[in-house]
Image (tube, helix red, strand yellow):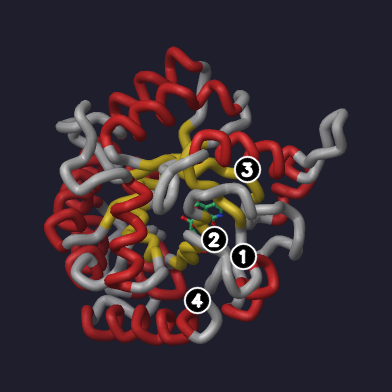
Amino acid sequence: MSGHPEGSFGARLTEAVAARGPLCVGVDPHPALLEAWGLPTDAGGLERFALTATEALAGSVAVLKPQSAFFEAYGSAGIAVLERVLATAREGGALVLLDVKRGDIGSTMAAYTAAYLADGAPLAADAVTVSPYLGFGSLDAAVEQARLTGRGVFVLARTSNPEGHAVQRARDAHGATVAQSIVDEAAKCNEGADPLGHVGVVVGATVGPDEVSLERLNGPVLAPGFGAQGATAEDLRRVFGGEQRGLLPTSSRDILRHGPDPDALRAAVERTRDTLASILP
Ligand SMILES: O=C(O)c1cc(=O)[nH]c(=O)n1[C@@H]1O[C@H](COP(=O)(O)O)[C@@H](O)[C@H]1O
């Protein structure tokens, strides 16, 4: 646990985005997409789909985000595919954000930490998504282990789905929303980090403007909802302004639907990056 040879997650992400542009592509093997690619909806089809997408994109996008549920659906065979996706993405030079949205009591969180954030673990990734709804402090083991090993965590704050409003916009006794208090906790973890801390937050591109203040975060902001869930580049500007540091829009289906041709997948990424370049610093 002596840190990553290439530095902190904030430094690695900043470098990857500078070299490859601010885009994360989700590897979400929806059964409907497997069918659209002419693949069977079984573990073999999953493998072809996930590896085709990963091999096509790992050399050019900053971050790949495999969604664990779509792999878990095929049991141990699906997990074996996920392990190969992690290795293939790494070989291609992309950072891997494993989307598992874990959150549990502290002692169990320590086990999730060993599963995803420990050097040499079969499912170790550069970062994972975590859920703070058992209390931000329940995530301490993951936050600390990520820091020690040059990895990151992305904490759900204001999610892209319409059902998120009720709980995330609720206010505490001081008038702060739940979403803002999560961002503020993340900001504390990132204090003093340079160029960027390792505790990111998730804020959907579909939410209203000014719902959360990200000014003091000093960490990455994963912005899902862009593409298939309806948010546009203009919405990104509306929600985050033109100058949000560490902003990482993520898109899954809207890129993957262009497969299975690897060139078509890469061309979809290029187009998306060009659109983003016109609105992001
Ligand atoms: O953490 C996430 O990645 C996430 C958070 C959120 O608020 N909304 C959200 O859609 N996601 C994930 O982002 C991906 C969005 O996929 P598309 O709608 O196909 O681009 C899915 O894997 C979701 O699980």
Q: Are marks 3 and 2 in contact (CB under 8 Å)?
A: no
Specify which label sits upstream in the sequence, 1 or 4: 1
Q: Which mark is residue 142?
A: none
Specify which label sits upstream in the sequence, 3 or 2: 3
Q: Are marks 1 and 3 in contact (CB under 8 Å)?
A: no
86 shown above or below 225: above
User: Is residue 81 left or right of 249 when viewed as pictured?
Assistant: left
Q: Amino acid at mark 3?
A: Val
Specify which label sits upstream in the sequence, 1 or 3: 3
Q: Residues within 10 Å of mark 1 (few under 14, many from 20)?
A: many
Specify which label sits upstream in the sequence, 3 or 4: 3
Q: Are marks 3 and 4 in contact (CB under 8 Å)?
A: no
Gap between marks 3 and 2 measured at Cα: 14 Å
227 shown above or below 175: below
Q: Secondary structure at mark 3?
A: helix
Gap between marks 1 and 4 measured at Cα: 17 Å
Specify which label sits upstream in the sequence, 1 or 2: 1
Q: Pointer 3: what residue?
A: 183
Q: Pointer 4: what residue?
A: 281
Q: Residues within 10 Å of mark 2 (few under 14, many from 20)?
A: many
Residue 12 seen by the camera:
yes
Q: Pointer 1: what residue?
A: 205
Q: Pointer 2: what residue?
A: 223
